[in-house]
Image (cartoon, coloured by chain):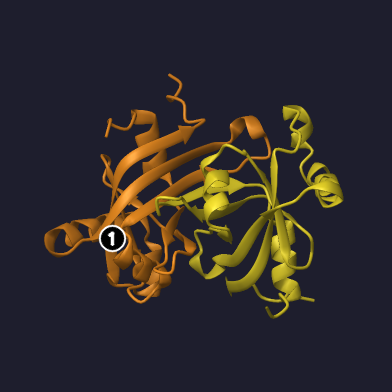
Chain colours: A yellow, B orange
Amino acid sequence: MKDLTSAVRAYIDAARVCRIATVRPDGEPHVIPVCPVFDGDATIYVDIGPKSATGHAIANEARVAVLIDDYDENWTLLRKVLLKCRADEVTGTERDTVWERIRTKYPQYASVDWQPRQTMALRIYDCIQEGIAAPAH
Amino acid sequence: MKDLTSAVRAYIDAARVCRIATVRPDGEPHVIPVCPVFDGDATIYVDIGPKSATGHAIANEARVAVLIDDYDENWTLLRKVLLKCRADEVTGTERDTVWERIRTKYPQYASVDWQPRQTMALRIYDCIQEGIAAPAH
């Protein structure tokens, strides 16, 4: 994959929520909102329920579509990034590092006392974007 | 399908944007943001590009997952509705009625001079919701 532009990387990094689409074993599409953490390069991390429909779907089909977008009533300001990814579960030290990032970005995790459930790396292999310009100087 | 509750119907009706997930012919998931119009009962209408990846996907697999959600930094306020739907294209008088609703809900269409492209009815056959309570009285 070509490197993501700095503008796209900044947009992904700032996202507080994204929507991820998966395909269930019976071929039905599924989509959920999740809180993403970006490594700054080409991987997004999300923590999902291991017995969730998304977890079940990924076990069968590793391709995941990640949408980060902002709706605005001024349609000239619509922005979106679609990331095509391949999912694999992270464990060991990679997971420890991810969870430091997750707890820093989302202090809300403290209030719900979450521990890692099924922590997935979504490795980006393609990117389609609209409306993400380089930041003004 | 059981009727949607009045709270869920009100939530769907108020949504300015939703994300719809489809499955491409090669089995890859896809997801886009679109502007939905609700008939108040069990159908959501969206207009998509006829040569878009979503249009191509639906031609092969009519099941569509529609996510309407609101992110909030206060995680006790997170809300979402996932609607499992079956898509079919609307034509004739149904399409005329839909486009009256679309133009009323989204006056922005005037500024971009859109005409109907591929207008889809997403017929809801299942609903999963979290955090959508009945309105307070």
Q: Is residue B5 left or right of residue B21?
A: left
Question: Residue B26 appears in which quarter of the rendering?
Answer: bottom left
In this rendering, is residue B76 above or below B69? above
The residue beneath circle 1 is: B120
Q: Residue at x 35, y 69 (%)?
A: B55
Q: Which quadrant of the rendered structure holds the C terminus of chain A?
A: bottom right
The numbered mark 1 sits on a residue in which chain?
Answer: B
Q: Residue at x 40, y 67 (%)?
A: B54
- Name the secondary structure under disc 1: strand
Q: Residue at x 45, y 50 (%)?
A: A25
In this rendering, is residue A110 above or below B123? above
Type of amino acid at the residue the image marks with label 1: Met
Q: Which quadrant of the rendered structure holds the N terminus of chain A?
A: bottom right
Q: Is residue B132 visible?
A: yes
Residue A71 or residue B104, whichever sits in front: A71
Q: Is residue B76 left or right of residue B16?
A: right
Residue A77, given in percent of the width and then of the height, sits at 56, 67
Residue B10 or residue B31, whichever sits in front: B31
Q: Quick one: which residue is furthest to the top in this view?
A: B137
Residue A20, given in percent of the width and then of the height, sits at 56, 54
